[in-house]
Image (spheres, helix red, strand yellow):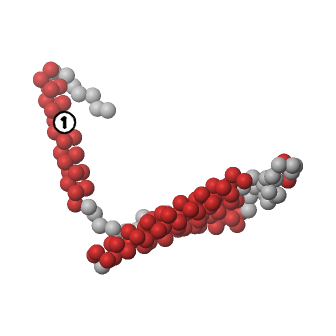
Amino acid sequence: MSVSLCLLLAAGFLVACGVYLVTERTLTRIVIGLGLLGNGINLFLLSQGGRAGTAPILGTALSKMSDPLPQGMILTAIVLSMATTAFGLALAYRSWRLSGHDEVTDDLEDRRLAKTVGDTERFLRLDLDELDKSHGRKRREL
């Protein structure tokens, strides 16, 4: 089984561009990045499918058949990426209608929750330190 270098380079380029766009702050770039990422992975699966052959039907020699698994996986991935793209575009459109831009903003509730969790961890750490001091032990760090 020989793998085409051109297909692998194209798949790698699409995946790299997709990852770059997914890390951006606007929803439209994230949606485009997810599309590129999905297409790059589909190209990679296609390149790993092996050589072209006949349809895998009963009565055909095994050496002449093509592997149907990558093709089925690619069809499933196409449907899932279409649904993800539709959902992402709906989110971007709704964000555009509500705020006039599609930039992903930090959620204030997430910041408050992170601060609360940090305060709780600091409080528990202080309680353990005080408990260890009262028993005359040195606390082990994990």
Residue drawn where x is 48% and y is 63% of the image: 84
Above or below: residue 7 compared with residue 65 = below
> In the rendered image, which quarter is residue 76 located in?
bottom right
Using the image, determine if residue 68 lies above or below residue 128. Answer: below
| Amino acid under disc 1 | Leu
Other-residue count near label 1 (Cα within 10 Å), few / some / many at <14 / 14–19 / ≥20: few
Q: Is residue 84 above or below residue 117?
A: below
Measuring from the top left, give residue 5's x and y in whole percent.
Answer: 71, 63
Say which quadrant the C terminus sits in.
top left
Residue at 64%, 63% in the rendered image:
43
Q: Judge from the rendering whether residue 86 lies leftward or rightward of residue 65; answer left or right.
A: left
Residue under circle 1? Answer: 124
- Residue at image location 49% in from the left, 71% down from the top: 32
Q: Secondary structure at mark 1?
A: helix
Residue 46 or 119: which is nearer the viewer?
Answer: 46
Q: From this viewpoint, which residue is outermost toward the top?
A: 135
Q: Looking at this rendering, what residue extends furthest in the bottom direction?
A: 100
Q: Picture quarter containing residue 90? A: bottom left
Q: Quadrant of residue 134?
A: top left
112 or 133, nearer to the observer: 112
Looking at the image, which is closer to me, 109 or 24? Answer: 109
